[in-house]
C-alpha cells in the first residue's frame, strides 16, 4: 500500500449524486465508485456502478490495468504499476502505458439540471423532457500504440445504500436486458425491484457473463472501525478492438432506456466537458477570467499526455481562485423534499445541515455574487422556522425537520445581515422581518430545550440533557462529549449581534416606510437597549486569570475555563460587544495555543482532555472530534477577528500549506473537514467540506 497514491478525486452533479475514487484507481472507501445516484435528491444515494475492470491485449500480451485490495491482504491486479500520469483538471484522467502502447481514461459526471443559477425558477426544470432527474456518468478510453489493442471492460455493479457494503446472497439477483449497444440492468432484492439503469457504448461487443467477485476490502473503513468488505456483481464484459487514435465512450444512466435521448457518439464526452465549463463560466464569469478558465482547461483536456499533479503546485493566483470556485459549486444541490436549493455539508457521507449551510453561505454565494442562490437558501430556512428555531436538517420525506440546534436561528439572522449589507435588498428584509421577530420572541419567551433569555442579565441560555445544541455537537452513548449547557460564549455573541441587526433593521424599515414607522422606531430603540444590556453582561465571560473568555457559564453559574476557539468566534461576528484590549488578548492566546497551518484546534493542547489525533472507531473518533481536532472553517473567524483588532498587523498565518492541501492532498481540488491537532496535522474526516472551502474563498483574495 505504501506504493499506492490514495489521494482522492470527486465529481458531483448538482442533485447529490457523486463519483469518487483514488489517483492509483484502488477503492479504499465504501464511498468509492463511479455512480452514486441520489434517487431522492440529494438523498437516497445508491451505488449502482462501482467501476469497469480493464485489461488490454497488445501484440498477444494481455495486461490488467485495475488495482484491487482483497480481504486476503493481496493487491491484485497491480495496474497502478503501469500508471504513467494522472490529472484532475478539467476532469479526472489516467494514462497507463508501456513502450509500445498508451491507454487513457477520463470520467465526467454531467450536471443534472439545465445550466443556470440554482435558486432561479428555470433551473428547476429537468434536462429530460419527461421531467425526471438525470443521474449519469460518462467514461471515455483512448488508445495509442503501434498495433491494434483489444480492450476488455468488465462491469462491476451494486445496488446498495452509500453507507453500507454489498454482500452476495441468494436474495440478491440482477436482471439484464441486452439491446443494440446497450444493456439495461436492475437488482432484485428479496423480491423487491431495485433502481433500474442502463449502460450504453459507442463501439464493441458485449458478452453476458454473470459472476460474483467476493471480498474486496476498503482499508480506510478498516482504519475507521467500520464495515470494510464488499462483494461486487459482474453481469458481463465489453470487448473493443481499438486502432491507434481510437476512442470508446460509455454512459451509465439511471432509468430505463429512452428512445428520445440523444445518440451516444465519440464527441459526447468532449461536449459534456465543454458544457460543464460553460456552466461554470456563466455562474462565475463576473468573479473570474472566464475565458482564461475555459481555454486553460480545454487545452489541458486536449493534450495527448497530461503531466502528473505536482506535490507542491505553484499555480497563478487566478487559477487557484478558479479552482476554489469550482470546488464551491460541488456543494450546491437541489433538495426534492423542499423543492429548493440546499448545501451538502461535506462529501462523502454528509447530507445538508442548517448550521453548516448558513456559516458557509457568505463564501459560497456572497463572495462569488450568487445572490439569487443566497436569497433562495435564506428563504428556504426562513420558511421552515418553527418555535423560533431554524432547522438543522431536513428530512427526505414529508416529515418534520430536525430542530436540534440553538445557534442555527442566530446564524440565519447573522447571514441574513451579511446578505442585506451586500445587496441592499430591503424589500427582502421586509418579507423576512416577521421571521426575525419570531426568533426574537421565542428566545425571549422560551422555546424547545429550555432555550431562553435570562431576564436578569439578558444572556441566552439552554438546559437539556442528552443533547448537544452548539456546533460542538458530538454525542456518545447518549452523553454529549462537550455538552456546553448554560450560556455558551459564541451563542451570546451571536445574540448580541442579532439585537444589533434588529435595531438597525427596524430603523431602516421605518425610514423606507416598509411598515408602521412609529412602531418600528420604538422596536429599534428597545432592541438597542437590550443590546446595551447584553454588552455589559458579556463581561461575565471574561477570565482575568487567563486573559481569555470562559467557554460556557453553566446552569449552576460555574465557569468553564477551557481554552477553545469559541472565544475567537465571539470576536468575529459583524457586531462585536468586546473591546480592543480583550480582543487582542484573546487572539494572542489563541495564536499560541490553537492556531495551526490548517485552522484552529478545538481545544488547547495543554488541557487534560486534549486528544491530538482523530483516530480509532466511531466512538473514539467522536470523543476526539471537538477535543483538540483542528477545524479548517475556523480560520475564517480567526482572520475576521484579527482584521478587527489588529488591522495594521500582518496576519500570523501563511496560506501556502492550506493551498497545497487544496491542490494536491487528500481530495484533490477540495479541502478536508478536519485535521489532527498534533503535527503533521494529517487531514481527517470528510475529504471535501463546504464551510472549509467557503471560508477560504471568503478570505483568500
Image (cartoon, helix red, strand yellow):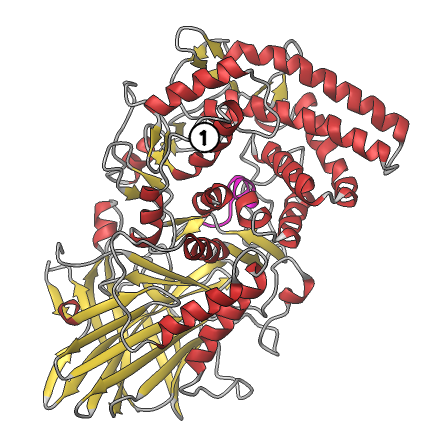
Instruction: Name the residue: 63% across, 38% down.
Output: 418
Q: Position of residue 491 (x, y in %)?
A: 55, 25
Instruction: Name the residue: 18% across, 67% down.
Output: 67
Q: Nearer the viewer, residue 371 or 207?
A: 371
Q: Is residue 337 above or below residue 359?
A: below
The image quarter in which residue 565 lies? top left
Magenta span: 350-361
Q: Main secondary structure of the magenta part?
A: helix
Q: Is residue 536 above or below residue 198?
A: above
The image quarter in which residue 179 lies? bottom left
Q: Nearer the viewer, residue 295 or 242?
A: 295
Q: Which residue is mark 1?
A: 638
Q: Is residue 139 visible?
A: yes
Q: Residues within 10 Å of mark 1 (few under 14, many from 20)?
A: many
Inspect the magenta stretch and tell me whether residue 135 lies in it.
no
Q: Is residue 454 visible?
A: no
Is 681 on the left-hand or right-hand side of 531? Answer: left
Amino acid at each position: 500500500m505504501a506504493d499506492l497514491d490514495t489521494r482522492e478525486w470527486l465529481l458531483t452533479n448538482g442533485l447529490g449524486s457523486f463519483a469518487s475514487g483514488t489517483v492509483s484507481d484502488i477503492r479504499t472507501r465504501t464511498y468509492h465508485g463511479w455512480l452514486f445516484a441520489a434517487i431522492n435528491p440529494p438523498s437516497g444515494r445508491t451505488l449502482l456502478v462501482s467501476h469497469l475492470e480493464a485489461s488490454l491485449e497488445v501484440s498477444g500480451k494481455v495486461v490488467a490495468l485495475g488495482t484491487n485490495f482483497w480481504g486476503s491482504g493481496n493487491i491484485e491486479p497491480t495496474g497502478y504499476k503501469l500508471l504513467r500520469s494522472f490529472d484532475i483538471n478539467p476532469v479526472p484522467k489516467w494514462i497507463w502505458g508501456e513502450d509500445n502502447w498508451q491507454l487513457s481514461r477520463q470520467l465526467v459526471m454531467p450536471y443534472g439540471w439545465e445550466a443556470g443559477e440554482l435558486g432561479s425558477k428555470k433551473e428547476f426544470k429537468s434536462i429530460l423532457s419527461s421531467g425526471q432527474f438525470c443521474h449519469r456518468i460518462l467514461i471515455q478510453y483512448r488508445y495509442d500504440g503501434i498495433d491494434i489493442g483489444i480492450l476488455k471492460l468488465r462491469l462491476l455493479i451494486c445496488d446498495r445504500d452509500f453507507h453500507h457494503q454489498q454482500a452476495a446472497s441468494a436474495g440478491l439477483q440482477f436482471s439484464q436486458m441486452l439491446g443494440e449497444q446497450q444493456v439495461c440492468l436492475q437488482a432484485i432484492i428479496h423480491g423487491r425491484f431495485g433502481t433500474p439503469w442502463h449502460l450504453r457504448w459507442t463501439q464493441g461487443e458485449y458478452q453476458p457473463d454473470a459472476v460474483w467477485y467476493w471480498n474486496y476490502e476498503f482499508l480506510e473503513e478498516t482504519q475507521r472501525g467500520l464495515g470494510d468488505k464488499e462483494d461486487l456483481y459482474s453481469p458481463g464484459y465489453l470487448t473493443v478492438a481499438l486502432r491507434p487514435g481510437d476512442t470508446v465512450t460509455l454512459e451509465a444512466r439511471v432509468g430505463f432506456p429512452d428512445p428520445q435521448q440523444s445518440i451516444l457518439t465519440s464527441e459526447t464526452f468532449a461536449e459534456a466537458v465543454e458544457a460543464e465549463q460553460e456552466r461554470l463560466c456563466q455562474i462565475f464569469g463576473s468573479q473570474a477570467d472566464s475565458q482564461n478558465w475555459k481555454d486553460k482547461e480545454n487545452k489541458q483536456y486536449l493534450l495527448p499526455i497530461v503531466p502528473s499533479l505536482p506535490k507542491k503546485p505553484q499555480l497563478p493566483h487566478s487559477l487557484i481562485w478558479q479552482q476554489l470556485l469550482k470546488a464551491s459549486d460541488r456543494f450546491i444541490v437541489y433538495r426534492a423534499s423542499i423543492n429548493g436549493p440546499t448545501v451538502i455539508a461535506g462529501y462523502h457521507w454528509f447530507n445538508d445541515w442548517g448550521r453548516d449551510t448558513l456559516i458557509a453561505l457568505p463564501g459560497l454565494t456572497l463572495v462569488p455574487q450568487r445572490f439569487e442562490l443566497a436569497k433562495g437558501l435564506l428563504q428556504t430556512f426562513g420558511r421552515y422556522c418553527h418555535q423560533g428555531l431554524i432547522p438543522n436538517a431536513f428530512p427526505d420525506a414529508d416529515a418534520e425537520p430536525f430542530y436540534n440546534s440553538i445557534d442555527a436561528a442566530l446564524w440565519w439572522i447573522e447571514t441574513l445581515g451579511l446578505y442585506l449589507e451586500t445587496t441592499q435588498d430591503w424589500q427582502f428584509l421586509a418579507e423576512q422581518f416577521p421571521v426575525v421577530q419570531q426568533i426574537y420572541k421565542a428566545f425571549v419567551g422560551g422555546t424547545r430545550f429550555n432555550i431562553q433569555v435570562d431576564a436578569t442579565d439578558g444572556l441566552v441560555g439552554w438546559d437539556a440533557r442528552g443533547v448537544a445544541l452548539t456546533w460542538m455537537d458530538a454525542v456518545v452513548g447518549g452523553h454529549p462529549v462537550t455538552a456546553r449547557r448554560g450560556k455558551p460564549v459564541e451563542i451570546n455573541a451571536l445574540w448580541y449581534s442579532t439585537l444589533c441587526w434588529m435595531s438597525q433593521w427596524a430603523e431602516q424599515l421605518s425610514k423606507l416606510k416598509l411598515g408602521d414607522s412609529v412602531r418600528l422606531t420604538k422596536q429599534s430603540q428597545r432592541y438597542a437597549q437590550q443590546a446595551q444590556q447584553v454588552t455589559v453582561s458579556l463581561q461575565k465571560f471574561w477570565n482575568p486569570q487567563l486573559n481569555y473568555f470562559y467557554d460556557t457559564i453553566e446552569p449552576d453559574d460555574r465557569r468553564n475555563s477551557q481554552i477553545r476557539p469559541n472565544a475567537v468566534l465571539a470576536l468575529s461576528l459583524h457586531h462585536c460587544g468586546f473591546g480592543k484590549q480583550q480582543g487582542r488578548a484573546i487572539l494572542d492566546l489563541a495564536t499560541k495555543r490553537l492556531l495551526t497551518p490548517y485552522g484552529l484546534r478545538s481545544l488547547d493542547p495543554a488541557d487534560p482532555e486534549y486528544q491530538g489525533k482523530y483516530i480509532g472507531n466511531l466512538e473514539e473518533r467522536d470523543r476526539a472530534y471537538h477535543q483538540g481536532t483542528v477545524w479548517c472553517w475556523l480560520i475564517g473567524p480567526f482572520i475576521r477577528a484579527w482584521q478587527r483588532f489588529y488591522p495594521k498587523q500582518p496576519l500570523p498565518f501563511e496560506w501556502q500549506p492550506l493551498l497545497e492541501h487544496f491542490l494536491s492532498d487528500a481530495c484533490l481540488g477540495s479541502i478536508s473537514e478536519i485535521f489532527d491537532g498534533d503535527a503533521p496535522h494529517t487531514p481527517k474526516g470528510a475529504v471535501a467540506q463546504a464551510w472549509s472551502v467557503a471560508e477560504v474563498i471568503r478570505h483568500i483574495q
